[in-house]
Image: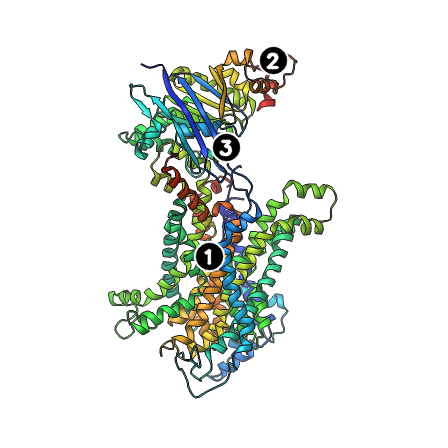
């Protein structure tokens, strides 16, 4: 390992909400102990077991929310039905109460979940495609293309996203959910493009890629067969982050009243709650549930992201080492500081 | 005054992973004052683990399961390394035993000037020293080791590999320790630089009289600079003898194999020993 | 090229990019902002041909001049500080309105961001240093805060601390009944009181990112050889943690500031809306709701320039904290 300079522009992790690991997966974990005979390859089963708590909890929460969004709308009534029982607290008939016009909050929540998930998914895919285009393709081909893609990425990165989205969407009066998704995607791909670029650059210089090139493989084939598969964990993490960012971004935009017209999302619910004075009149059942769902989904996705990170960089595991330490202490009563002594 | 500086007895280190790995087994070792002891063996044989154990630098899951390492101090007291509290351990480190690590690139803090990294040692171990004294002492060390005092404000990345290794050695000399553990100190360097540094170490040893534990997989190199050599295999010492006897009458088959595995250009055994200026090309194969 | 030169060049390019986006958006997107604007202006009084031209310059419209000429005129206008006239506050120039709102946002986001950075880096350092400790196990929990949208957290805090228990005021930037804007004690006290809840919102929702980044960097840094050297030197743990581990681990966080700042600024815009804070975010939304395009474009430009400026400063600071960047110059 030589001088690990960090390009201040490279932002190192660059992942959306700055919540991922710097240098993720770029370098193998190395230990300062030259002789470490204790390392033995971990089997797949063992790995899955080792990761399970975070991954399982994360996936379970996501599953519950997705099911609610997919099946929920069929089970509830019309979210637009107006009744003359405005702003009633939760009851048997309306488990989450009603809005100021007597609409069923639970019904709205089910439709909103569907809308938000859809946006998150579409934006996640679009942003991923854009980041692969600018991050992977550019850095693989190199030369002026890489330079200009990289510059473009960096410029997009320092221009604050939400103000740009606000400005764009204020010019587009009637927005469908798809227009909104495109707007969100073109303002949110840059961070992950940069992460992908740095990982691709390191992959590009690996011996097996050089070998494929010497053997006369076509560029698209090398990207598809040699590089992309190795990028999968990073791509997965970036996708997860893109989905979180999209759902948060859409919620913010809709809350400001700039969301898609005629669609229920968590953000539009919060917008309506705000306009219906839910806050000042204490109608907590109206504005709490959408936020809780956003937070839980975001939390679940970051748990999944943690789990992916730990596959990529075993050093980051917390629980495993903790357990080891405890076991050693229990068995031998040694001190952890300054070398362990039996 | 005792002639023995360090006694290691029945030393065992185990990596407490799911299938425990016995990295150092039943090592017994006595190191004389002023002696250079070579520790040879292939990578993973436990030589570095042993050296780290003597300084208690091991981290979990590595555990010293049994045995002791006792340093017989200059003033006559015996220091049982395993019994030191963490405060005592910090005082013991570098003051009695200093270390020179392999690959000095990463062994130096990349964001601190080397003068500050030497200064660190004095502020910790010699709190009475004044700032000017510390600076003068650091500068003198750099002069002594041939880096030059004008490099005090340099950062590690501004120095060549050889220079960095010299700075490491200067740091290791700072407190005039009685033992210096050198873990592959010259492995990453090119042969000429390697040669200079080895000569430097030998001279410094003569001047200051410290002992050296010199760890490397490069047996010819050890034959040249060591007084005695310990050959390690799978955590145990299989042979421990003077360099001369190891070279001429290696007993253990592993040692013999090691010796044979270094080719000589002239075909004669012994030609590989580097003798100053003429036969540099041989050393290259081992570097 | 020197480090400084490269940084300046990059931010100039980024600034040019932002200006160009600002120029192209109203021209390329559907709708006719100039007509809308002029109709609104006409309702307030006669629209002089000069005013009409000035608006067309900013937002495009039916000008016969080719795009490139419009572009040159637009850039000239920006350089001379002509951002047009607001219709919401007619006839106040856009620049003036922004000048009134900017100090609020800069102080709120500035203080909150620095606080979040310090708290996150400090806790991240400790969590990474003592891996597996209770603090370290709390790391996933703090990132949950990140998943919570800024504005929803703001709503929640507002509900709990201003509606349910009136510890803090419900909205505004200061008490305009008792204090008047200026450098007097009453006003500062009032501004701090009103700013506390928005600041807490920003800190709580953004420190988790710093924490996680720093924690992970600490973990990687602790396995570096120079940490072992420091331990072998017998240095005190606090010294190793600060001078060796944290000093190196903080570098990527500083370098990654650009990305985070964009998020903080975006989050703060919405937060300002929740608290009706008289900052640049509220101004932007007001402009959007009133179709006050000149004001909107101006605010976007100023936000972008401010973010670019902050990043430039941080990048220059980075040159100071990492000697290796200096060496390349």
Residue C66 image point, x, y percent? 64, 69
* Residue, disc 2: B271
Quote the CA–CA distance across marks 2 and 1.
62 Å
Q: Callout 1: helix, strand or loop?
A: helix
Q: Is A262 left, or right, of C245 in this rendering? A: right
Q: Callout 3: helix, strand or loop?
A: loop
Residue C308 image point, x, y percent? 48, 57
For the residue carrying disc 3, how many other residues have a C-alpha within 10 Å: few (<14), some (14-19), or many (20+)?
Answer: some
Q: Is C156 left, or right, of C18 in this rendering? A: left
The subunit carrying tag 1 is C
Quote the CA–CA distance across marks 2 and 3.
30 Å
For the residue carrying disc 2, how many other residues have a C-alpha within 10 Å: few (<14), some (14-19), or many (20+)?
Answer: some
Which residue reaches farthest right? A216
Q: Residue at x 51, y 74 (%)?
A: A110
- Could you say which disc has been placed on residue A34 in the image? 3
* Residue, disc 1: C260
Q: Are discs 1 and 3 both within one chain?
A: no
Residue C150 image point, x, y percent? 43, 65
Q: Are discs 2 and 1 both within one chain?
A: no
Marks 1, 3: nearer the viewer: 3
Residue nearer the viewer, A163 or C226: C226
């Amino acid at each position: 390992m030589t001088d690990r300079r960090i390009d201040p522009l490279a932002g190192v992790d660059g992942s959306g909400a700055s919540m991922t690991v710097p240098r993720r997966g770029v370098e193998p974990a190395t230990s300062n102990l030259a002789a470490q005979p204790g390392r033995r390859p971990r089997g797949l089963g063992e790995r899955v077991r080792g990761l399970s708590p975070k991954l399982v909890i994360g996936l379970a929460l996501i599953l519950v929310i997705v099911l609610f969004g997919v099946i929920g709308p069929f089970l509830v009534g019309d979210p637009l039905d107006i009744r003359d029982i405005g702003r009633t607290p939760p009851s048997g008939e309306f488990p989450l109460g009603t809005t100021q016009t007597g609409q069923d909050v639970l019904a709205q929540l089910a439709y909103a979940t569907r809308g938000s998930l859809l946006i998150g998914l579409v934006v996640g895919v679009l942003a991923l495609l854009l980041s692969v285009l600018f991050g992977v393709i550019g850095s693989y081909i190199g030369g002026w293309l890489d330079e200009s893609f990289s510059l473009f990425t960096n410029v997009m990165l320092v221009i604050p996203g939400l103000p740009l989205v606000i400005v764009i969407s204020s010019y587009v009066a009637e927005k469908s959910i798809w227009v909104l998704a495109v707007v969100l995607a073109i303002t949110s791909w840059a961070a992950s493009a940069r992460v992908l670029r740095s990982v691709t650059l390191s992959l590009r210089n690996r011996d097996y890629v050089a070998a494929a090139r010497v053997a006369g493989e076509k560029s698209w084939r090398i990207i598809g067969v040699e590089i992309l598969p190795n990028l999968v964990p990073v791509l997965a993490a970036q996708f997860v982050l893109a989905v979180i960012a999209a759902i948060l971004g859409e919620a913010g935009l809709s809350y400001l009243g700039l969301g898609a017209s005629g669609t229920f999302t968590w953000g539009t619910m919060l917008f309506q709650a705000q306009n219906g004075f839910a806050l000042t009149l204490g109608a907590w059942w109206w504005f709490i549930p959408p936020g809780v769902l956003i937070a839980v989904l975001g939390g679940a996705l970051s748990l999944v992201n943690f789990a992916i990170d730990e596959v990529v960089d075993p050093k980051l595991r917390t629980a495993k080492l903790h357990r080891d330490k405890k076991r050693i202490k229990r068995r031998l009563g040694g001190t952890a500081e300054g070398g362990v002594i039996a | 005054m005792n002639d023995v500086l360090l006694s290691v007895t029945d030393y065992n280190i185990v990596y407490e992973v799911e299938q425990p790995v016995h990295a150092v087994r039943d090592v017994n070792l006595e190191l004389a004052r002023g002696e250079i002891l070579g520790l040879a063996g292939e990578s993973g044989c436990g030589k570095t683990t042993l050296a780290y154990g003597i300084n208690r630098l091991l981290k979990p899951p590595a555990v010293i399961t049994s045995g002791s390492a006792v340093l017989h101090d200059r003033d006559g007291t015996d220091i049982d390394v395993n019994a030191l509290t963490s405060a005592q351990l910090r005082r013991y480190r570098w003051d009695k035993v200093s270390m020179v690590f392999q690959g000095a690139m990463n062994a130096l803090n990349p964001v601190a000037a080397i003068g500050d990294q030497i200064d660190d040692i004095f502020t910790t171990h010699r709190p009475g020293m004044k700032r000017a004294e510390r600076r003068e002492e650091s500068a003198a060390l750099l002069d002594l080791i041939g880096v030059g005092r004008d490099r005090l404000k340099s950062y590690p990345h501004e120095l060549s590999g050889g220079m960095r290794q010299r700075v490491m050695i200067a740091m290791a000399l700072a407190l005039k320790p009685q033992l210096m553990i050198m873990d592959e100190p010259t492995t990453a360097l090119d042969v000429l630089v390697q040669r200079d540094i080895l000569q430097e170490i030998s001279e410094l040893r003569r001047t200051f009289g410290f002992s050296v534990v010199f760890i490397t997989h490069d047996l010819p190199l050890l034959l040249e600079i060591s007084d005695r050599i310990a050959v390690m295999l799978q955590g145990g010492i299989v042979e421990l003898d003077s360099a001369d006897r190891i070279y001429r009458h290696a007993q253990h088959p592993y040692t013999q194999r090691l010796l044979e595995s270094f080719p000589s250009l002239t075909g004669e055994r012994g030609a590989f020993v580097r003798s100053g200026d003429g036969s540099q090309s041989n050393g290259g194969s081992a570097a | 090229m020197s480090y400084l030169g490269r940084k300046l060049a990059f931010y100039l390019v980024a600034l040019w990019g932002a200006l160009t986006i600002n120029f192209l958006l109203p021209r390329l997107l559907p709708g006719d902002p100039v007509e809308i604007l002029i109709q609104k202006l006409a309702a307030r009084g006669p629209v002089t041909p000069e005013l009409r031209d000035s608006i067309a310059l900013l937002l495009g419209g039916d000008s016969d001049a080719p795009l490139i000429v419009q572009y040159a005129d637009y850039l000239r206008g920006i350089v001379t500080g002509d951002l047009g006239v607001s219709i919401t506050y007619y006839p106040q120039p856009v620049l003036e309105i922004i000048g009134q709102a900017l100090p609020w946002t800069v102080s709120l986001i500035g203080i909150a961001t620095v606080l979040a950075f310090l708290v996150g880096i400090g806790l991240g350092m400790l969590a990474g240093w003592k891996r597996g400790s209770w603090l370290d196990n709390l790391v996933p929990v703090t990132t949950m805060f990140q998943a919570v949208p800024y504005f929803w957290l703001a709503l929640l805090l507002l509900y709990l601390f201003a509606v349910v228990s009136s510890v803090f005021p419900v909205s505004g930037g200061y008490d305009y009944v008792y204090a008047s804007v200026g450098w007097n004690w009453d006003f500062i006290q009032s501004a701090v009181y009103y700013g506390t809840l928005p600041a807490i919102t920003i800190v709580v929702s953004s420190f988790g990112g710093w924490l996680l980044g720093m924690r992970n960097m600490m973990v990687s840094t602790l396995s570096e050889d120079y940490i072992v050297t420091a331990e072998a030197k017998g240095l005190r743990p606090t010294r190793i943690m600060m001078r060796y581990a944290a000093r190196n681990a903080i570098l990527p966080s500083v370098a990654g500031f650009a990305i985070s700042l964009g998020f903080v600024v975006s989050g703060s815009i919405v937060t300002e809306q929740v608290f009706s804070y008289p900052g640049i975010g509220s101004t932007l939304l007001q402009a959007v709701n009133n179709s006050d395009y000149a004001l909107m474009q101006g605010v976007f430009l100023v936000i972008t320039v401010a973010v670019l400026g902050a990043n430039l400063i941080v990048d220059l600071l980075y040159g100071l904290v990492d000697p290796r960047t200096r060496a390349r110059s």
